[in-house]
Image: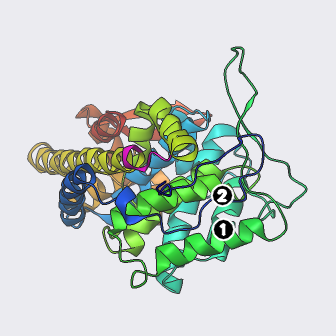
Amino acid sequence: MKKPLFTINPDRNVPWNDLPDLPIHEELYRTVNIMEQLANAKAALGRLHGRSIAINQGVLINTISLQEAKASSEIENIFTTDDELYQAYSEKEEDTTLKGAPKEVLRYREALWSGHDYLINNNEFSEDYFIKTYRRIKKTTDGIRPTSAHIYIRQGGSGPNARKAIYTPPRGKGVIESKLKNLIEFVNDDKTYPIDPLIKLAIAHYQFEAIHPFRDGNGRVGRIFNINILTEKGLLDFPILFLSRYIIDHKNDYYSLIAGVTQRGQWERWILFILKAIEATSNLTFNKINDILSAKDGIIDAIKEDTKIRKPEQLVKMIFTQPLTKVSHLTDAKIYAEGTARNYLNELCKLRILEKKTMSGHHYYLNLELYRILSE
């Protein structure tokens, strides 16, 4: 009898300490369907990579990655409105009392970029990378879950199977650390494991979720891991792929396909899902960048034609750095004096480029086009 290519989990109620080490067997990922979808995903990602060079880094850092943070948090049922999120981000330096969902989303965004910076400085993934990412997301000093933490992944909902264990991750002295070490070696070592980075990402994401190294926050750490792999492998310059949007739109498939690998060894379907997610969200992010650039050009032209505003390019750059602008953003950047900044922002309101909003006693100026583009 032919030996199976992947040893599945025999009992979902018992810690899966026999979770197979990486790499998986080549036959599981080198299929015609995967190779065809890989070509599509790489083409879309390459186009996004080339286009991202044309846009101001501040826009990428403060807008698109903020939407990724919001979407990834929604997967974990952490919801906030765009207005709440943009207000929280606008006030982040001053407001030390910020709580609730907006604060959690901002922590995700910070973890995404701190992971990116960590890899620039260290050139490879490590256990320290994962622990720091987890700690930033959860604002904790906790680390790898101890043997005493009996973690079960349970069925959600309110049906007859609600709260039943659907998976029990590895547990035991040194077990999680050993599994994580194998995963890290697999991702870092492209000579020993010469697998295309996008396929490697799909395999690594599943393995991380199966190891489930932390008490909580594993889904968010795993999705940051995805995007940081793309930048670490040189496929993107910045962690801007809106990957969680696709997962939200196909949330049931996401969890079902993870379980399909665990329980039935269905690697092809899982890898195809991730490759399609990369293709779709690369196209989505590419289109958002184009729309933002077009909107900026249109607003600059309108300001030059209809006003006598000085330094219009610098002003437009600032109002596109984040959806909500304050007078202090312009004065802190030393673009205008306070009175001039306020007058110019109010003038843009008359042109219906901005909308003045008062929230929690503070005045903000909402970039209507940027808000629309990010919300689509």
Q: Residue at x 64, y 52 (%)?
A: 218
Magenta segment includes 266:
yes
The three-letter amino acid code for the residue at tag 2 is Ile
Q: Position of residue 183 (x, y in %)?
A: 57, 70
Query: What main secondary structure does the magenta stretch of the protein show?
Result: helix
Give the residue number, with chain letter if any, for mark 1: 179
The residues bearing labels 1 and 2 have C-alpha atoms spaced at a distance of: 7 Å
Between 249 and 51, the one lying in front of the other is 249
Q: Position of residue 21 (x, y in %)?
A: 58, 67
Between 241 and 12, the one lying in front of the other is 12
Residue farthest top in this picture: 159
Q: Tell me: residue 108, above or below residue 156.
A: below
Does residue 333 appear anywhere in the picture? no
Q: Is residue 151 left or right of residue 232?
A: right
Give the residue number, with chain letter if any, for mark 2: 211
Q: Position of residue 129 (x, y in %)?
A: 61, 72
Q: Residue at x 86, y 52 (%)?
A: 149
Q: Are marks 1 and 2 in contact (CB under 8 Å)?
A: yes
Dot 1 falls on a residue whose secondary structure is helix
The three-letter amino acid code for the residue at tag 1 is Lys
Q: Is residue 356 left or right of residue 285?
A: right
Q: What quarter of the picture does the C terminus occupy?
A: top left
Dot 2 falls on a residue whose secondary structure is helix
Between 281 and 348, the one lying in front of the other is 281
Residue farthest front in this picture: 1
Residues in magenta? 265-269
